[in-house]
Image (cartoon, grey):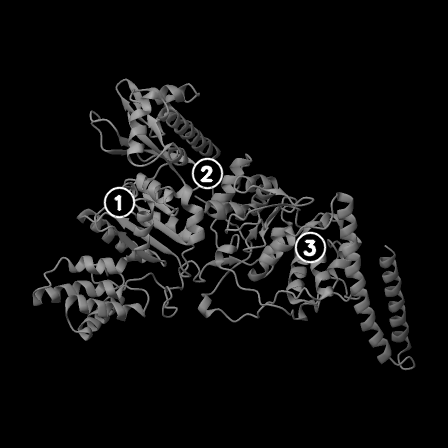
Amino acid sequence: MAGLIKREDIDEVRQRTDIKEIVDGYVTLKSAGIGSFKGLCPFHDERSPSFHVRPQVGTYHCFGCGEGGDVISFVQKMDHTTFSETVEKLAHRINYTLRYEDGGTGPRREDVGKRQRLLDAHKIAAEFFRAQLLTPGGAAGRKFLEGRGFDQAAADHFGVGYAPQGWDGLLKHLTGRGFAHEELKLTGMFSEGNRGIYDRFRGRLIWPIRDISGDTIGFGARKLFEDDQGPKYLNTPETTLYKKSQVLYGIDLAKRDIARNRQLVVVEGYTDVMACHLAGITTAVATCGTAFGADHIKIARRLLSDDGSGGEVVFTFDGDEAGQKAALRAFEEDQRFIAQTFVAVEPTGADPCDLRMTRGEPAVRELISSRRPLFEFAIKATLKRFDLNTVEGRVQALRAAAPVVAQIRDPAMRPAYSRELAGWLGVDVEDVLRAVSAAGKRAKDQPATAAASPQGTGAQQRQPGRQHSGPGQQYRGEGQPGGGSQHQDRSQPRGYSGAPSRPDGGRYGGQGDGSRYGGQGDGGRYGGQGRPVERREQQHSPYPGEAGYAAPDAYAGHPEDAAPSKPVVSLPDLRDPSVRMERDALIVALQQPGLLDAEQWQHFTESRFREQAHAMVHEAIRAAGFAGATPSQWVESVRQAVPEELRGLVSELAVTPLPAHNDDAVRLYCRGILNRLFDIQITQLKADKMGQLQRTDPAADPEAFQRLNRELMELEMQRRALRSE
C-alpha cells in the first residue's frame, strides 16, 4: 500500500541533494558572488539572467517572474512530476531508502533497481539505433526521412534511428553490454520463439518514445521494406515502463513550452510532431497507437495548469471520415478539461507533415492558427448526419445538436451558438433556445446517466461542484485544480538548530518578557506601505495538497469564491532607509544563520519590524528557530510558515546577493547589518522609555522612576558598544 513519505526522509533528501547540480542540468549557471549563481530563467523568456541559486541555503528564485523554492519544487516544476514522485526520484539519485507513514510502502529497492536496468537498456538501444541510421544499412531510413523533408539535424534532435534487418543485431549489442536474456524479455524490444528471443524491430525506422522526464521507455517503428509482413507502424508492447494510454510522444521536448504558452497541440503521428516542432509549433505531441484518453488528459492538465485561468488544447485530425470520428471521440473527453478545446482540420485532408512538405512551414502554423472551437466542429459534424432539406431532418438535427450547444462552458457563448445553429438549420432562434435549455435541464436532472457526447442528451453533465465564474470564464469550483478544495499544508515546519542554545532552552533567543528591544508581541501591528502583493496561483506553492507529503497539521481549504476575506499584505516601501535595514537583516538571518551567535539571535528575535510583510517573515524565522530546523530545512521552513503570498518574498530574500567578495567580508557585513538593526531598535526603545520616564512622577513612584533611568542607561551603553564595532 502506498503511503506518505516520512517528513524526516523528505528533509534528508533535500539536505543531501545539491540544488546547483540539479539546476545545472536545465540552466547554465555562472557565479554571481560568494555562494551565489545566476542564469536565464527556465520558467519565462528573458534576455538577461535574473534566475538566482544559492546552494548554501538550497533555494532558487527568479527576480523576473517570481518563481522560487527548493530543489524538490524545482524538479516538480521542470519535470511536471508529483511531490512523491519527485522525492522518490531524488532519493534514488542519492541511493537513499525512503520510509513511509502508517506502514505504507513506496517502490521497493529491488523494483527500483529493475526499473533502472530497463531504462539503461532502452538508453543503450536508442544510442544503437541512432548509430545504425548513419551506416550503409541505414540508407533506406535516411531516404525515408529526406523524402519527408527531414535532414540529419532533425533526426538527431528527435533521436530517430534505424533497426538493422538482421534478427539479433540489438540482442547481441545489449548482451555484450551485460544484459541477460531474462532482463531483455521485460523491455518489449524482443520477441520470443522456439529458439529464444530475437529483435522485435527489424529493417525499420525507429523513434524513441520518452516519458516526461526524458527517459526512453519504448520505441515506435515504421516499415521501410515491401517484404516486411508486419504492420505499417509497430510500437513497443505494454511493459512495466511503457503504458501507451499514459504516453505522449514528444512530451519531453514540448513540456516546457506547453507550460509556458498554456497550449497543447495534439497531432496523429511521429512525423507530424517533428513537422510541427520544426515549424515553430513546439507544443505538439502525439499519442502512441491509441486514442487521446483520460490518462493523457491528466498529463495535459498538469502541464497546462488547467485551473480555469486560461489555456487551450488544439486537436488536429485528417479531414476524412476517420479523422472526424477521432475528433468526436476527443469531444467526449472535452468534459475533463477546463481549458478551451479546439480542432484544426486542413480542408484537403493534409496532415502537418504533408503540409510542411508541399507548402512549407508557414502552412503548418496557419493550420494551427485556423483552429475552431471543438464544440463548433462537433455541432457541424452532428448536422451532417441529417438531411436538412426536409422538415423531419431539421427537427432530428435540432434534437441531436441542442445537447452539444448546452455543453458550451461559457454562458455568454451558448446563446450566440444557439443563433448560429438556428441559421445553419434555417429554424427560428426561439425554437433552438428552448431546445438547448431543455437539453441542459435534462443533463442536470440525470447527472449519473447523461451521456456527454454529440449523440446523447447529457450535454450539461459536469463534475460535481463546478461553478460559473462569469461570462467568458471557465468553470472553477470544488473538485478542480485552482478551485480551492485542495488541502494545503499550513503547519509551521520545524526550525533551524544551527546556533547555540540559550540557557533557558530556546534557540536563537526565546520569547522573553519583551523588555529588551521591545519584544515581538506587537510586531505585527505595523501596517506596511507600498504595492499590494499579487496572490500567486496554486502551482507556485511547492507542495500544498500533494499526496506524497506527510504534513503534521494540514487543514482543508475553502473554494476561492467562498473563502473568508483576508487582509491584503503589502510589499515594503524600500524608499524608507529603516525599511531597507529591516530587509537586509532578514536577508542575513535567512542566508547566514550560522554566523550569528546566541546573543545576536536573541537580539534579532526580540526586534520589532515596522513593515507588515517584514514582521510576518520575521515571525516565521522565529518559529523556525524555536522548532529547531536543520540548515537544509531552514529556508523552506520559513517559506512554508508565511502566508502563501509572501513565499516569493522569502525566496527572493534567500538568494539576494550579499555585497561581499570573500568569507571575511561576508562575516563583517552580516555583523554590521545586525548591529545597525539593533542600533535602530535601541533608539526606538529609548524613545519609548524616555516618554514613560517623562510621564512618571518621581515622588509618587520613585521605584519606577529609578528603574526607567537604569534601563535607559543600559540601552545607551548597548548602543555605544554597537557603534564602537
Residue 11: x and y in percent read 59, 45
Residue placed at 22% from the left, 26% from the top? 228
- Screen quadrant of the N terminus: top left
Of marks 2 and 3, which one's residue comes earlier in the chain? 2
Cα separation between marks 3 and 1: 55 Å
Mark 1 and mark 3 in contact (Cβ < 8 Å)?
A: no
- Screen quadrant of the C terminus: bottom right
State the mark number for residue 174: none
**What amino acid type should be assigned to the residue bearing mark 3?**
Ile
Cα separation between marks 1 and 2: 42 Å
Residue 272: x and y in percent read 31, 42
Mark 3 and mark 2 in contact (Cβ < 8 Å)?
A: no
**What amino acid type should be assigned to the residue bearing mark 2?**
Pro
Q: Is residue 441 left or right of residue 681?
A: left
**What amino acid type should be assigned to the residue bearing mark 1?**
Asp
Q: Nearer the viewer, mark 2 or mark 3?
A: 3
431 to 344, vertically: above or below: below
Residue 327: x and y in percent read 24, 52
Residue placed at 22% from the left, 32% from the top? 231
State the mark number for residue 587: 3
Residue placed at 75% from the left, 43% from the top? 662
